[in-house]
């Protein structure tokens, strides 16, 4: 089994939610962790400073920021073993009402942010025969209504990771992506509305969702066991397979599920 002890782990989007939990658990498992976020002061306030933690200000939608983050990590510790592309945002808006800038922002962060960081970290991870992991979503397997940009970004991410895994098949590098279900984090609170503003409230009952800590544990356990992919919930597993086997039924079930959420944008189309 792959041990994270003394490994250099790079984590994007670490100031809250799953990213924050990944940082804390990685440190607890003895890793050296480099973490980035757009707000450095907020990022640094989340953790106790120590020799095994390196915080860096970076916006993953900006190629130069990603290159600077990876280079700074390498310069600090002389290598990179694990990359976890975690940074991401969501949305809730009908496509016919959403500004195109919202779709572009989701692609820039969720897809291009992962591509940029992977590109610059890859030579180091090939050398260390390490791990590249990305936090995807069930939306990367099954398109979700009122989440067109989010689904598109996660489908693109899954395709990128699968192609990369195949390219690197004989290099010793392990490529893995994970699909959490609905997780108790702030991703929905900052999800984009049709005009790009933060949603500011979640339609879900957060106390009934998987905790960010549990999600992080499953991600790191999966990395140590070198899992290919992880679908974390039975609901997600059902959605993936139902979409493959009975796609028309999946269309109707997914529509009804998202129609029933509080304040569903889909109610516009109901008569």
Image (cartoon, rainbow, N blue to C red):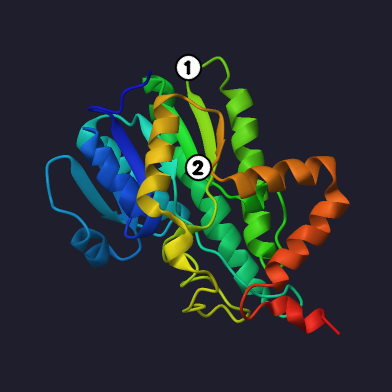
CA neighbours of label 1 inside 10 A, class few (<14), some (14 to 19), many (20+): some
Residue for badge 2 = 134
SS assignment at label 1: loop
Disc number lying in front (2 or 1) = 2
- Residue lying furthest top in this view? 170
- Which quadrant would the N terminus be assigned to in this image? top left
Q: Is residue 41 visible?
A: yes
Q: Position of residue 189 (x, y in %)?
A: 46, 72
Q: Residue at x 72, y 80 (%)?
A: 97
Q: Is residue 90 above or below residue 47?
A: below
Q: Between disc 2 and disc 1, whose residue precedes?
A: 2
Q: Residue 173 versus residue 220: which sits nearer the camera? A: 220
Q: Position of residue 135 (x, y in %)?
A: 50, 46
Q: Is residue 14 above or below residue 77?
A: below
- Which quadrant would the C terminus be assigned to in this image? bottom right
Q: Do the numbered discs 2 and 1 sit on residues whose CB atoms are within 8 Å?
A: no
Of the numbered discs in the image, which one, if any, rests on residue 172?
1
Residue 28 in which image quadrant: top left
Q: Is residue 61 visible?
A: no
Q: Is 1 on the left or on the right of 102, as rendered?
A: left
Q: Is residue 152 above or below residue 93?
A: above
Q: Residue at x 56, y 47 (%)?
A: 136
Q: Residue 179 versus residue 255: which sits nearer the camera? A: 255
Q: Residue at x 62, y 60 (%)?
A: 150
Q: Position of residue 80 (x, y in %)?
A: 33, 31
CA neighbours of label 2 inside 10 A, class few (<14), some (14 to 19), many (20+): many
Q: Is 146 on the left or on the right of 229, as rendered?
A: right
Q: Is 99 on the left or on the right of 14, as rendered?
A: right
SS assignment at label 2: strand
């Amino acid at each position: 089994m792959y041990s994270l002890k003394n490994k250099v782990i790079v984590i994007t989007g670490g100031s809250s939610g799953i990213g924050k939990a990944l940082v804390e658990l990685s440190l607890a498992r003895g890793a050296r962790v480099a973490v980035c976020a757009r707000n450095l002061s907020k990022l640094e306030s989340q953790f106790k400073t120590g020799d095994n933690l390196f915080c860096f200000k970076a916006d993953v939608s900006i190629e130069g920021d990603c290159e600077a983050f990876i280079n700074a990590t390498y310069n600090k510790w002389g290598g990179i073993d694990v990359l976890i592309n975690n940074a991401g945002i969501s949305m809730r808006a009908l496509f016919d009402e959403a500004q195109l800038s919202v779709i572009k922002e989701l692609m820039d962060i969720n897809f291009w942010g992962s591509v940029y960081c992977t590109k610059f970290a890859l030579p180091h991870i090939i050398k260390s025969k390490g791990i590249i992991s990305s936090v995807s979503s069930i939306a990367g397997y099954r398109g979700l209504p009122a989440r067109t940009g989010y689904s598109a970004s996660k489908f693109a991410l899954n395709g990128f990771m699968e192609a990369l895994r195949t390219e690197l098949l004989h290099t010793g590098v392990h490529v893995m992506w994970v699909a959490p279900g609905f997780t108790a984090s702030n991703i929905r609170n900052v999800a984009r509305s049709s005009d790009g503003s933060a949603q500011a409230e979640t339609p879900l009952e957060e106390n009934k969702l998987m905790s960010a800590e549990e999600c992080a544990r499953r991600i790191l356990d999966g990395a140590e066991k070198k899992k290919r992919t992880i679908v974390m919930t039975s609901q997600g597993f059902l959605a993936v397979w139902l979409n493959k086997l009975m796609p028309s039924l999946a269309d109707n079930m997914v529509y009804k599920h998202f129609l029933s959420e509080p304040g569903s944008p889909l109610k516009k189309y109901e008569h």
